[in-house]
Amino acid sequence: YSNNGGCQHNCYNTVGSYYCTCDSGWELSSNGKTCTDEIECSSNNGGCDQNCINTVGSYYCTCNNGWSESDNGQTCTDINECSSDNAHGGCQHFCYNTAGSYYCTCVNGYELSSNGKTCIDEIECSSNNGGCAQNCHNVAGAYYCTCNNGWSESNYGLICTDINECSSNNGGCQHNCYNTVGSYYCTCNTGW
């Protein structure tokens, strides 16, 4: 400092005096000679959109995950993750971009696996028998309902109603026809 007019960084001579200045990123201390690091991030976040990192004599900006730094080094632009990995962002079915992130969804009949990207067949029959009255059959991406023999199906198997086999042609019985739940039986008249 002694051969620089006592200035830590820059000394400027004036008529009968002098004054000190500091390099960019530094502030002149109250003694008018030494320089301290300017904390650029303390004012308006250093002009950074997201993160301001102070360094000795300078600073720099960073962006959160899901964002990219623009050419000016201060602003952050959302990364469209859905436009990468063959326009699905790694999602098996559908990808939806959000600010700084994204999420995956599946077509009906499939549910998102624990990895948040792949879709697995939803086993609709495992919950409340799929809403079926009697039989639930799971197939890839869907399911369907059926009724047991002796029952008529309505509303795509969501309702099964007992068929009264005896109401049509006496159930094929020669004498007596008795309807039972889901079936029927024949008997003969007394003496036969």
Image: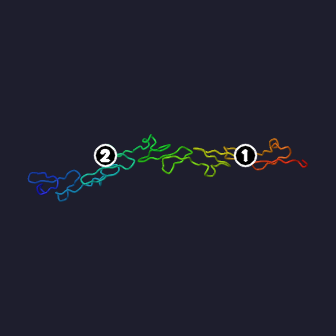
Name the residue nearer the viewer: 120 or 106: 120
As drawn, the residue found furthest toward the top would be 86
Q: Is residue 81 left or right of residue 22?
A: right
Callout 2–callout 1 Cβ contact below 8 Å: no
As drawn, the residue found furthest toward the front would be 192
As drawn, the residue found furthest toward the left would be 16
The residue beneath circle 2 is 73
- Picture colour scheme: rainbow
Quarter of the image with the N terminus is bottom left
User: Which of label 2 and label 1 is nearer to you?
Assistant: 1
Name the residue nearer the viewer: 71 or 173: 173
Q: State the mark number for residue 149.
A: 1
Q: Amino acid at mark 2?
A: Gly
Q: Secondary structure at mark 2?
A: loop
x and y percentages locating residue 59 in the rendered image: 28, 51
As drawn, the residue found furthest toward the bottom would be 31
Q: Secondary structure at mark 1?
A: loop
What is the tally of numbered marks visible in this picture? 2
Local crowd size for mark 2, using a 10 Å CA cut-off: few (<14), some (14–19), many (≥20): some
Tell me which numbered mark, 2 or 1, is placed earlier along the sequence.
Answer: 2
x and y percentages locating residue 40 in the rendered image: 27, 53
Q: Amino acid at mark 1?
A: Asn
Local crowd size for mark 1, using a 10 Å CA cut-off: few (<14), some (14–19), many (≥20): few
Mark 2 to mark 1 CA distance (whole Å): 73 Å
Name the residue nearer the viewer: 20 or 78: 78
x and y percentages locating residue 14 in the rendered image: 10, 51
x and y percentages locating residue 67 in the rendered image: 38, 47
Q: Give me the residue at 87% from left, 47% from top.
A: 188
